[in-house]
Amino acid sequence: MSKSITVPFLLSGMPAERKPVSLQQLESLSRQLNSSLDLETILDILPQGMRELLGTARGALFLVDPATDVATCVRAWGVSSDYTRKVEAQYRNLPGGTLLVERATVVEDVNTDPRFDDLREDVRREGLGSMILAGLRHQDEVSGALVAYYDSPRHFLPADIFLAQTIANHTAVAIKNAHLYQSAQQRMAELEVLRRVSLQLASSLDLPALIDTIIDSIAELVHPNMVHLFLHDDQTGTFNFGSAWRDTGDREPVVDTVRADGITARAVQQRQAIVINDAPNHPLYGQNPAAPVREWGVQAIAAFPLVRPSGVMGVFTISYTRPHEIT
């Protein structure tokens, strides 16, 4: 017979019972989670696994971007998107908001727990009574939290907490492997793009076609909303529009001239890349009423000079109309 541990089992309004959970069930969930390198498949497996092992049909998975420290709910079941959005905005002030480095966090009654004062009405609307928040931990890295929600207040046994944390640990490993695989695939795609560009550079004498190839390759690599390339004449210090790309498929530029004090001109002067990740609050854009980019809602922008020994032959810019961290 398989060894078992006992956990509470509660389904939508039913009274709490004790239901044995075998280690075979836990091993089965672990195998399922780690049998795929596709993140969406992993996320699809979690709800049923948590229902079988933790006895709840309600849960959510939050991941934190280490670069921005922003929490995002990547999957939720049995709770509304309105609720998870509020948790995203306030997660640092909620139980487990320090990313659960030391241990799982238990909330046995969300209606009386003072840590939920700011979300009191929200948890009532959702019909939440209690929850376990288990950190996604892999080695020394903590990347988010797995939350099991229950309809009623309840007392959690040590076995409940251990089981929730074990599921979270297995989930963290599966997600880490999926991200590593995704990064490797992205790297292979980038190398293929660079190979195609190199072949084009070596074989083409058609400058407009060459410029379009560069622009298309940049768009494929970094997925911006807009790309612009301006050619620069070192002798006269003037710029000529080279090419543009938009995620709408339009090739028409949003701007076809270069401001004397804009990011493109400054990239030539400094001969190095300039990155602005918060354009609405940057002096060049949000605080400059003359900047046309204010009209097209740029959130992040970067300019990269094309430097050669004799000078700068041009500058390409990438722009995002959504929040984005350019690194």
Image (tube, grey):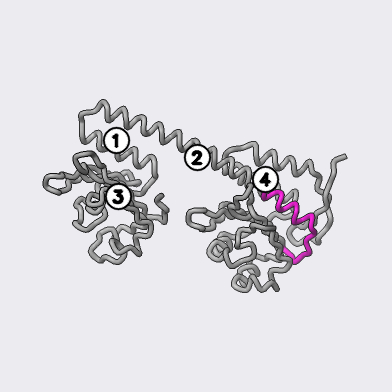
Instruction: Please give the name of the residue rendered at 25% of the width and 42% of the height, measured from the top-left corner.
Output: 307
Q: Secondary structure at mark 1?
A: helix
Q: Considering the numbered disc 3 on the image, is that residue within a helix, a strand or a loop?
A: strand
Q: Amino acid at mark 2?
A: Ser
Q: Which residues are magenta?
A: 151-171
Q: First in sequence: mark 4 or mark 1?
A: 4
What residue is drawn where x is 70% and y is 52%? 165
Mark 2 / mark 3, whichever is N-terminal: 2
Mark 2 lies on a secondary structure that is: helix
Q: CA distance from mark 4 to mark 1?
A: 43 Å
Q: Which residue is mark 1?
A: 213
Q: Which residue is mark 4?
A: 170
Q: Is residue 163 magenta?
A: yes
Query: Is residue 18 among what the camera can see?
Result: yes
Mark 4 and mark 3: Cα distance apart in space: 41 Å
Furthest residue toward top: 203
> Which residue type carries mark 4?
His
Q: Amino acid at mark 3?
A: Ala
Residue pictured at 65% horizontal, 39% vertical: 34
Q: Nearer the viewer, mark 2 or mark 1?
A: 2
Give the mark, 3 or 1, whose residue is nearer the N terminus.
Answer: 1
Q: On the rendered image, what quadrant is the N terminus found in?
A: top right
| Mark 4 touches mark 1? (CB < 8 Å) | no
User: How far apart in space, not on screen, are marks 2 and 1 (Cα)?
Assistant: 24 Å
Residue behind mark 3: 303
Write down the residue under mark 2: 183
